[in-house]
Image (spheres, helix red, strand yellow):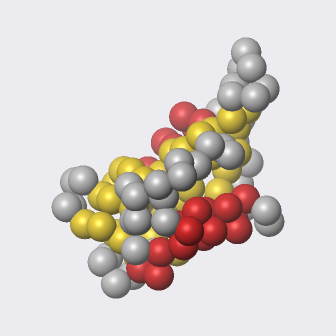
Amino acid sequence: MKTYDTMSEAINDLQQRGYDHDFNLTDDCLECVQKNNRLKADEFEIDEVYRFEGETDPGDENVVYAISSSSKNLKGILVNAYGVYSDSLSAEIVSKLHKHLEK
């Protein structure tokens, strides 16, 4: 897996490698607004994960996920604050995202 100094560097490289959609977390799935698609936990894979600490506050961490879905023919990026999961997110989504952070 590659190493990046900044979050923008990671995002730019992933976009150049075809991860060209933006994903957002919803209560029970990932949503790709550009394609009007919603992916349940069993409909996507997490290909790569990168963690970044804030420059001024080490507690201000973000995670960049490279996500793919072969069934929907989508590749994209999810950016999320590390460790801050809304209680309303489904257990399946939280588990899948968190599992990849522990590697």
Q: Position of residue 13 (x, y in %)?
A: 53, 47
**Residue 47 visible in the picture:** no
**Residue 84 visible in the picture:** yes
The image quarter containing residue 68 is bottom left
For the point 56% across and 68% down, the residue is: 91
Placement of 62 over or under 31, stated as above or below: above
Q: Quadrant of the N terminus?
A: bottom right
Q: In this orientation, which residue lies closer to the viewer: 45 or 11? A: 45
Does residue 86 appear left or right of residue 55 in this picture?
Answer: left
Q: Position of residue 22 (x, y in %)?
A: 36, 50
Q: Position of residue 67 (x, y in %)?
A: 49, 64
For the point 33% across and 59% down, the residue is: 31
Q: Quadrant of the C terminus?
A: bottom right
Q: How many marks?
A: 0
Which residue lies most toward the top here?
Answer: 56
For the point 65% across and 57% down, the residue is: 49
Q: In this orientation, which residue lies closer to the viewer: 74 or 56? A: 56
For the point 36% across and 71% down, the residue is: 39
Does residue 69 appear left or right of residue 61 in this picture?
Answer: left
Does residue 32 appear left or right of residue 8 in this picture?
Answer: left
Q: In this orientation, which residue lies closer to the viewer: 24 or 12? A: 24
Q: Position of residue 55 (x, y in %)?
A: 72, 20
Placement of 63 over or under 56, stated as above or below: below
Which residue lies most toward the front here?
Answer: 87
